[in-house]
Every structure is written in C-alpha cells, then in structure tokens.
Amino acid sequence: MNCPRDAAALELKTVGHANVQTCPQCSGMFLEHGQLNAITDPTPGDLEFSTVDQDSYQHDDEFGPISCPRDATTMRKVDFNIESNIILDYCPTCHGFWLDANELARINDEVKRLNDAGAEVPDPLLVRISNFFWNLPVPH
Ligand SMILES: [Zn+2]
Ligand SMILES: [Zn+2]
C-alpha cells in the first residue's frame, strides 16, 4: 500500500499488539478494519462503529479528500470527538481509518489537556482511543 498523501510505500510498525501501516515520510498511518478495536482496551460495544456513528454530518478539514490506500475508495471525514475538532478519514468500503501525523499530535494534545485539567472525561470513546494514542511515537 502507498500513502494517500505522498505516495510513499507504507511500512509495518508494531504498535501494542498490532502491526500498523505507517508512512515513513509524513508519519500518517492506516488502521485496517478491526485494528482500532484490537489495539484499544477491550470494552463492550464496537468502538469503530461508535466513532463513525458520531459523524452525522460532513466536515471539511484542512486536507482535501483522499483515496483509501487499500481500495482507492474516496474516504469520508469523521469526527474523533465532537469538541476537539479532530477529523479522521474513514473508508466506507473496507472500514479502515487514515490518520495524519498532525492528527495524532492533536489527539495527544487533547488528551494531555484533559489530564492536566483533571477533567472528567464524559466520552469513553476518547478515553479508549487515547489509551492507544498515548503509546504512539508522535513526530515533532
Ligand atoms: Zn505519507
Ligand atoms: Zn478502503
């Protein structure tokens, strides 16, 4: 597979118990169907479904639409969570997610902000995803 941003060949990196396709150039990554659930803490319900289901409306973000690296379907924008304004790319065909490197950094910032504030996190989805993203190498 190749990066949908810069066409570099994606490389497998081990993250937790999963092998994730990552881009050596821009540090974006492609999460295959089931991978988001597999690498976060086991919780009832389908994490990926709830992620996608939160997006009842379409957004534009700073990046244009991209094609899925697996099957070239045009990916849809979905909210990571409502308040953070972090937008992920989701493939309706293979149900994979594309995350840009700056999105990982922003998710980490968001989690850090909530932790520093000692905030009650009302969204269990954010907590579960953050457990995964904390462990990722974030490019600077
Ligand atoms: Zn790339
Ligand atoms: Zn796809």
Image (tube, rainbow, N blue to C red):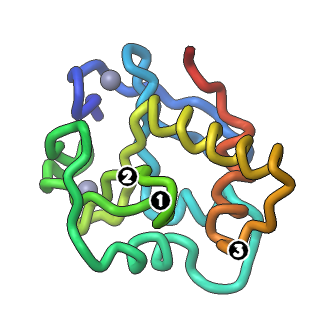
Q: Residue at x 43, y 16 (%)?
A: 24
Q: Secondary structure at mark 3?
A: loop
- Residue 63 rendering spot, x and y as whole percentages: 22, 37
Query: 90 and 32: which one is in front?
Result: 90
Give the residue type at disc 3. Answer: Pro
Q: Residue at x 49, y 78 (%)?
A: 50
| Disc number lying in front (1 or 3) | 3
Give the residue type at disc 1. Answer: Phe
Dot label at residue 80? 1
Dot label at residue 88? 2
Residue bearing mark 3: 122
Crowd rating for badge 1 (residues with CA inside 10 Å; few <14, some 14–19, many 20+): many
- Residue 7 rendering spot, x and y as whole percentages: 21, 23
Dot label at residue 2? none
Q: Is residue 94 left or right of residue 117?
A: left
Real-space CA distance between mark 3 and mark 2, rounded to the nearest whole angstrom: 20 Å
Q: Are marks 2 and 1 in contact (CB under 8 Å)?
A: yes
- Residue 43 rendering spot, x and y as whole percentages: 74, 77
Q: Is residue 4 left or right of residue 26?
A: left
Q: Is tag 1's residue or tag 3's residue first in the polypeptide sequence?
A: 1
- Residue 52 rendering spot, x and y as whole percentages: 39, 72
Real-space CA distance between mark 1 and mark 3, rounded to the nearest whole angstrom: 14 Å
Q: Is tag 3's residue or tag 2's residue first in the polypeptide sequence?
A: 2
Q: Secondary structure at mark 1?
A: loop
Asked which quadrant contains residue 112, the reply is top right
On the rendering, which quadrant does ligand 1 occupy?
A: top left
